[in-house]
Amino acid sequence: MLQAVRRLLIGLAICAGLVLAGQGLWIHAKAFLAQILLDRAFEQSVATGQVVKPWSWLDTYPVARIGVPRLGESAVALEGASGQALAFGPAHVVGTPDAGEDGTAVYAAHRDTHFAFLAAVRIGDEILVTRRDGGTARFRVTDHDVRRWDQSGIDPSAPGRHLVLATCWPFGAVTHGPLRYLVHAEAM
């Protein structure tokens, strides 16, 4: 009897482990597929000049591709910094201009996924932002700092053409906090 109970418990533990491992693999598979669909939708938007959603129920759409050539990193940015948008990539903050227009364009993303590469960005690096209309804005990193989320000092209507990439701080943290890492860049 004791042997049968032990086998049952071992079988249940193995099943639970397989279910958890399957869920983890499923999440990664969905994330991988989402990036492919975002890339395709962005390319179609550039080619047609129309808003193209990567899947019909997404509450946002691709608006730009942000890249740092020195690092070989890029990510498709979505419109509006909603929770759903941030789950899939960087997001263009509503109320800020598009990259390359007068003012300060702001894009935000999670520190442990799409903007993890910001930890390696250096002053002087070039940032390329390809917009949905096919235009590319070039920026040079001028500064980076850490600020409270509610005290960023970012002025979307500041004179000139600026870019701010924002993510949570510190990198590698596992809990939420009030600090944001800001990369500041000016148009070239």
Image: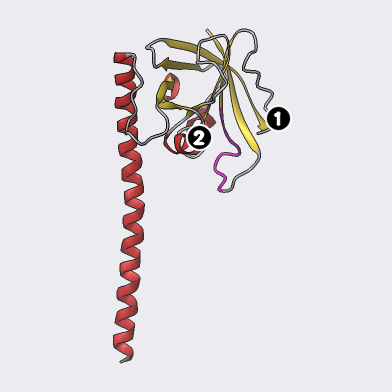
Report the residue marked by disc 2. 82
> Does the magenta segment cover residue 167?
yes
Q: Residue at x 58, y 14 (%)?
A: 162
Locate residue 140, reporting x and y percent.
54, 14
> Does the magenta segment cover residue 76?
no
Report the residue marked by disc 1. 151
Q: Amino acid at mark 1?
A: Gln
Locate residue 174, reporting x and y percent.
55, 48
Locate residue 182, reporting x and y percent.
60, 27
Q: Secondary structure at mark 1?
A: loop
User: As displayed, is residue 10 above or below residue 156?
Assistant: below
The picture quadrant where one finds residue 96 is top right
User: As displayed, is residue 97 above or below residue 27?
Assistant: above
> Within 10 angstroms of label 2, few (less than 14), some, or many (20 or more) residues?
some
Q: Residue at x 61, y 7 (%)?
A: 160
> Within 10 angstroms of label 1, few (less than 14), some, or many (20 or more) residues?
few
Which callout, 2 or 1, points at the residue further toward the start of the chain? 2
Q: Residue at x 29, y 14 (%)?
A: 48
For the N terminus, the image quarter is: bottom left
Q: Residue at x 33, y 73 (%)?
A: 12
Q: Secondary structure at mark 2?
A: loop
Locate residue 99, reporting x and y percent.
50, 15
User: As displayed, is residue 32 above or below residue 102?
Assistant: below
65 or 54: nearer the viewer? 54
The stretch in magenta equals 166-174
Q: Amino acid at mark 2?
A: Ser
